[in-house]
Image (cartoon, rainbow, N blue to C red):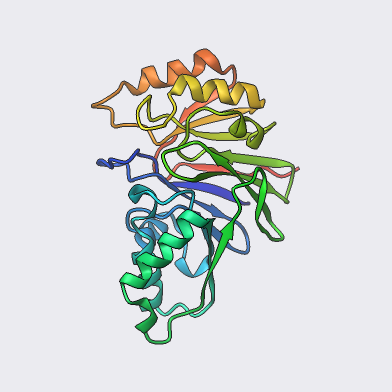
Amino acid sequence: MAKLIFLGTANAVAYPGHENTFLVLQGEESSILVDCSSRPVMRLKDAGIDHNDLSDLIITHFHPDHVSGLATLIMDMWILGREKEFHIHGCEHAISRAIKMMDLFGWQDWTDIYPVHFHTLPLDELAPVLDNREFKILSSPVQHMIPTIGIRIEYRGGEFVVAYSSDTLPIPETVRLAADADVLIHEATGTTFHHSTASQAGEIASLAGAKVLYLIHYPPEEKISLDSTLSEAKKTFPGNVYLAEDFMEVEFKGE
């Protein structure tokens, strides 16, 4: 059974029990990372996933809390003996900076490193990201401080769709990205720095016709009331609302 695992759920400031937001999509044949913060190889191991099973990484945008673990991921997999190729996808803004960051670490001189391929995505709505026997993944631009994409995951094992907003203001593009999704994962940071509130996330889920809403990328409880965050989303979304927690899983249901 394919599933999505929350490897981290905090906003830009991690805190005990909550790493910065990043996700992994685990299928029968491969695993796909969405963003790359914290200590990726360790978090994957804690989730029961072998780093060698990773086939791809999708970078939603080039902010530190979403890419801080990229160099460590590439280096750790090299040190641990990875041989098979690895694919990294993102918009031009993210990919060009990811390459520049790796160049600053001098990775060209790492002996016998496995092949790493970078793929630049257009900032078009529902642009193809990758397509394999298990998943079809599309991306759309969202509205944040820098170029950012949200993603739509369509499961080939059954008619099941998960959409992820990444960091964004509430916009129509996310509604279309999440149209009729079984699950929408939407950030709930608040009103600052081009983000969304829980209430706005609920509105987007309602407009999209999503069945279930998971709130993610939220501040620590010292800053907000998590109960009130859920309550605010429930005021604008009639379906089930959950607060994403680290290592929580979303199963992709088949037909």
Give whichever of 52, 189 is nearer the camera.
189
Which residue of the protein is positioned furthest toward the bottom in this rendering?
111
**Quadrant into which the C terminus falls:** top right
| Figure disc tally | 0
Image spot of residue 96 (x, y percent):
45, 62
Image spot of residue 139 (x, y percent):
61, 47
Q: Specify whether 214 is left or right of 255.
A: left
| Vertical relation: 64 (above or below) 42 | above
Q: Specify whether 170 is left or right of 157.
A: left
Q: Residue at x 56, y 55 (%)?
A: 26
Image spot of residue 84 (x, y percent):
53, 77
Q: Residue at x 43, y 24 (%)?
A: 197
Give whichever of 19, 166 is nearer the camera.
166
Which residue of the protein is positioned furthest toward the top in this rendering?
235
Image spot of residue 31 (x, y percent):
55, 60
Give whichever of 59, 78 is nearer the camera.
59
Q: Residue at x 37, y 48 (%)?
A: 63
